[in-house]
Amino acid sequence: MAEGHMSWNGHETWYDVVGDLHAGPTPVVICHGGPGAAHDYTEPIAELSRYGRGCVLYDQVGCGKSTHLPDAPADVWSPQLFKDELVELTRHLGIADRYAVVGQSWGGMLAMEHALEHPPGLRAIVVADSPASMPLWVSEANRLREDLPPEVQAALVKHEAEETTDDPAYAEAVRVFYDRHLCRVPWPDYVERSFAQLAEDPTVYHTMNGPSEFHCIGSLKTWDITDRLSEITAPTLLVSGRYDEATPHIVEQIHSRIPGSQWELFEDSSHMPHVEEPEAFLLRVEAFLEKID
């Protein structure tokens, strides 16, 4: 493992290289979600290195070990910022001519945005548990929310209406949703770490998303690339869970539009198959990447 920092546009992006990026098969850059959740919870994806595949974990600007900008204007936080960061990272690591991207949740949204730029060195993308439309994401999340216990729904509605979403009672109610649709196994340390740092500095998440997965009031609330998905030419694997907040309906909209895309639905998972069914996840992703090598 080789940790480092990349300086670019006045920012510092922390990264960690697992394995050799140049000696083996196509290396992968792993894009975490949130936005602003940091790399920790995606660490199991870097187990792809056991196949001799170099892996890059990194903290996107605004979280983890990278530059934090708690006082930055809201318009700083845009998909373009993170698209630029990803491009700079591939150049900095010397892999811009050959790499794949594995993006989870917001990271998968970023992967699709990146693929729409048609970078010449991009060999493939893996889009794990991601929407292509935030309005559809919110609609589906609120449909799932209707199945929560009545008292949990009441707590969510109360605090959202009163704008007291920083109340611990709201967090407790959200956790009920998370335990059903985010991660259905006891949260490992690496998942807890991501959520702890997200709580410590929620600037990016609150600005781009909002206080919770189903109360999106941030700058991403109208984000929708559904009509552009047919322009993606990179080989694409879609991954999601049966109980995922990225519901089968959401992922089907992507699968039907990206030419030749493959889709693996993990029956015992929600939003984190790489945590809930890690071995099956790694085997499926590696089998896909082997074909594009």
Image: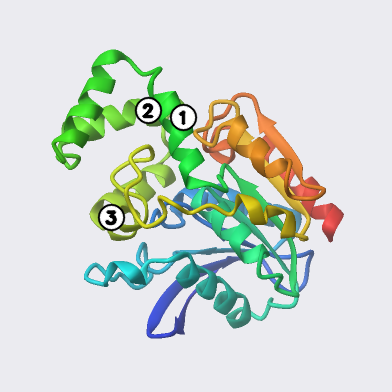
Say the numbered circle drawn on residue 181.
1
Please tell me whether mark 3 sits on a helix, a strand or a loop.
loop
Q: Is residue 59 above or below residue 279?
A: below
Q: Nearer the viewer, residue 141 or 58?
A: 141
- Quarter-wise, where is residue 112 in the image? bottom right
Q: Please report whichever mark, 1 or 3, sits nearer to the chain's N-terminal start.
A: 1
- CA gap, disc 1 and disc 2: 6 Å
User: Where in the figure is residue 132, as x and y percent of width and height?
Assistant: 57, 48
Please tell me whether mark 1 sits on a helix, a strand or a loop.
helix
Say the numbered circle drawn on residue 177.
2
Asked whether residue 283 appears in the rendered view, the answer is no
User: Where in the figure is residue 179, as x and y percent of width and height?
Assistant: 40, 27
Q: Is residue 97 above or below residue 165?
A: below
Q: Are marks 1 and 2 in contact (CB under 8 Å)?
A: yes
Indicate left or right for 125 with 221 as reference: right
Q: Estimate how packed mark 1 is, as few (under 14), some (14 to 19) or many (20 or more) residues with alpha carbons within 10 Å.
A: many
Indicate left or right for 97 with 45 as reference: right
Name the amino acid type tagged 2: Phe
User: Where in the figure is residue 107, as x and y percent of width and height?
Assistant: 53, 55
Tell me the residue at 46%/48% (across/down).
41
Asked whether residue 146 appears in the rendered view, the answer is yes
Tell me the residue at 26%/50% (across/down).
199
Quadrant showing the C terminus: bottom right
User: Where in the figure is residue 236, as x and y percent of width and height?
Assistant: 74, 52
Q: Which residue is mark 3?
A: 202
Say the numbered circle drawn on residue 35.
none
Q: Estimate how packed mark 2 is, as few (under 14), some (14 to 19) or many (20 or more) residues with alpha carbons within 10 Å.
A: many
Q: Is residue 191 above or below residue 150?
A: below
Q: Nearer the viewer, residue 80 or 181?
A: 80
